[in-house]
Amino acid sequence: MQDNIKQPLQQFMLQLADNLLVMGHRNSEWTGIGPIIEEDIAFASIAQDQVGQAWNLYQLLESNFGFAHPDQVAFTRNEKEFYSSHLVEQPTGEYDFSLARHYFYDLAQLLRYEMLSHSSYEPLAKLAKKFHGEVKYHVFHAQTWMKQLMDGNEVSKARMQSAVNEVFPFALGAFESVEGEEVLIAEGIFEGESTLKDAWMQQVGAQLLEWGYSLPQLAQPVLGGGKGYHSEFLQPLLDEMGEVFRLDPSAEW
Amino acid sequence: MKIKSLDPRINRIQIDADTENPQAMLHPLENWPTYEVFHQKKRGTHHEHVGIVHATSSELALAFAKEQFARRGETVNLWVVKSEDMMATDYADADVFATTPEKSFRDPASYSVKDKIDQWVAKQKNHAG
């Protein structure tokens, strides 16, 4: 593979994997303290799916792009070398915040995998097809809650609307192009973040209105994660996530 | 004093810590209705009752059933139905079933037809020959 394709492609997959790993880790923080036991289990499974998808992508980076072992890549880099968005690194907050983020994130992920399932880079297309069913469920789960709580009482409506408003600028910032994206587009590898964002906006707008939400103000997207610039929340998460691994990086698991 | 727990579900129901016999009062929003879950392993086979989930709508019940009862092994389909919509016989009326085991005439195993079938097969062969 030529360098001018390889570079943006591996960066694109690394960013995708980093987002999944950080999102999965954040969502896993609800394990054991979810609002009811059934939801606890469902949300923990979703978090596991996301970490699993990240693992698959890191593995592909190892086998086809000469990266280190997935554990090494996941647990030993610091925030400057992480390319995840500000959306996924925000603290879990209350359940309303986590649900709104879950909805925005997984809907984007579903559309992303639908696009990538036609990717000219065969190994990535294969993974996208494999992950599609998992994310279809994530979206069904998120949408059911988003609808349900907007259909609840005054408290649930107010809290969900304000969670949506709060998450929205971060969600808009989760479509950050990698350098050299135009090559990926030209090669038929990925249609590009801006095309994806348009498709996502269309669905988000229609769905929120249908469920009785007011559309959040078009805010300035919170960008920078894709370039390694993060809020104060990422490094503590990475410290915690890699804590056990770094005790003895050579340990056999 | 209320019991303080790491689990917000416990804190939410405000259990008295002072009494020897702490009691929790569940309010309607804390105590969701149950849905019966039926699981189908392969297309064309029957759905099997596997348990219940607590949910506030049948959609949410499906979302929960998927992870409670279909996160391991094979699944092609799930049904949920509100428990209160199930009609059931009363255990007090279980005597309506009492004599069923005696009615062996309803059990195909109590008829021996193997001889007759063999005879018929033999006859067909003779005809053909």
Image (cartoon, rainbow, N blue to C red):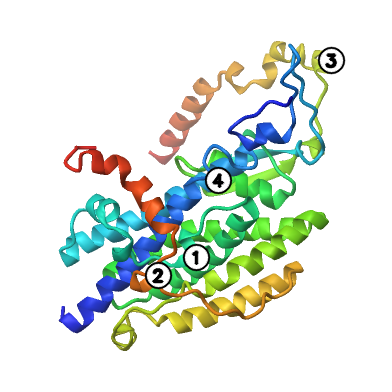
Q: Nearer the viewer, residue A13 or B125?
A: A13
Answer yes or no: are tags 4 and 1 on the same subunit: yes
Label 3 residue SS: helix
Q: Is residue B52 left or right of residue A133?
A: right
Marks 2 and 4, the one that precedes in the sequence: 4
Against A142, is A121 above or below? below
Badge 3 is on which residue? B92
Taking A205 as reference, is A1 left or right? left
Asked if badges 1 and 2 are on one and the same chain, I answer: yes
Quadrant of the drawing holding the C terminus of chain A: top left
The Cα atoms of the two marked residues, 1 and 2, are separated by: 9 Å
> Residue A173: image x %, image y %?
49, 74
The residue that mark 4 highlights is: A42
Q: Give me the chain letter of mark 3.
A: B
Tag 1 or tag 4, which sits nearer the N-term? Answer: 4
Q: Circle 1 marks a residue in which chain? A: A
Q: CA distance from mark 2 to mark 3?
A: 66 Å
Of helix, strand and loop, which one carries label 1? Answer: helix
The residue where tag 1 is placed is A87
Whether discs 2 and 3 lie on one chain: the answer is no
**Callout in the foreground (3, 4):** 4
Name the amino acid, label 3: Ala
The numbered disc on residue A225 is 2
Q: Cβ–Cβ below 8 Å for labels 3 and 1?
A: no
What's the CA distance linking mark 2 and mark 4?
A: 28 Å
The CA distance from mark 3 to mark 1 is: 58 Å
What amino acid does circle 1 point to? Leu
Q: Secondary structure at mark 4?
A: helix
